[in-house]
Amino acid sequence: MTRSKFTLWLLASLILVFTASFAGADNVTVMNKDQLKAELTNADVIIVDVRSPHDWDSSLSKIQGARRESPAQAEKSMAQYPKDKTIVFYCA
């Protein structure tokens, strides 16, 4: 598997796992890898990586331009982002 395909597979898996934890939450949409890939250049989308510091530091696969937030602070950090933006959290 090429690095690019692995990165996309990993990204899709991470998004599905993380967003599944919000399945009962209001106003939360699950985004698949193709949808996210199409949104990567959209200025109205903010991508937030909430992996643990160790996972973040040791990872070779990161979404360019993604912001880094502590997983423990992810919910609290929502207040800092504009309400008119689409916020995408992902983790491993």
Image (cartoon, grey):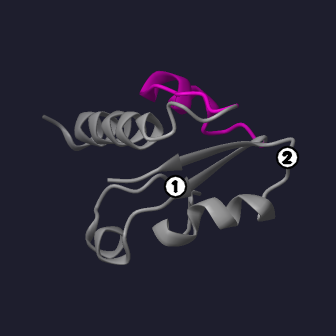
Taking depth in this image into account, of 65 and 24 the one nearest to the observer is: 24
18 falls in the magenta region: no
- Residue 61 versus residue 34 in the image, above or below: below
Drawn side of residue 84 relative to residue 51, left or right: right
Taking depth in this image into account, of 73 and 67 the one nearest to the observer is: 73
Q: Which residue is mark 2?
A: 83
Residue 63, position as x, y percentages in the image? 47, 52
- SS class of the residue under badge 1? loop
38 falls in the magenta region: yes
Q: Which residue is mark 1?
A: 64
- Residue 46 versus residue 40 in the image, above or below: below
Name the amino acid type tagged 1.
Answer: Gln
- Distance in Å between CA atoms under marks 1 and 2: 22 Å
Q: Residue at x 67, y 32 (%)?
A: 26
Residue 68, position as x, y percentages in the image? 54, 68
Q: Residue at x 57, y 70 (%)?
A: 73
- SS class of the residue under badge 2? loop
Q: Residue at x 85, y 46 (%)?
A: 83
Q: Quadrant for residue 78, please give it.
A: bottom right
Magenta span: 27-43
- Tell me which numbered mark, 1 or 2, is placed earlier along the sequence: 1
Tell me if label 1 and label 2 are in contact, CB under 8 Å: no
Q: Quadrant for residue 81, please give it.
A: bottom right
Q: Quadrant for residue 28, please give it.
A: top right
Q: Residue at x 22, y 44 (%)?
A: 3
- Per the rendering, the mark at residue 4 is none
Which residue is situated farthest in the left direction here?
Answer: 1
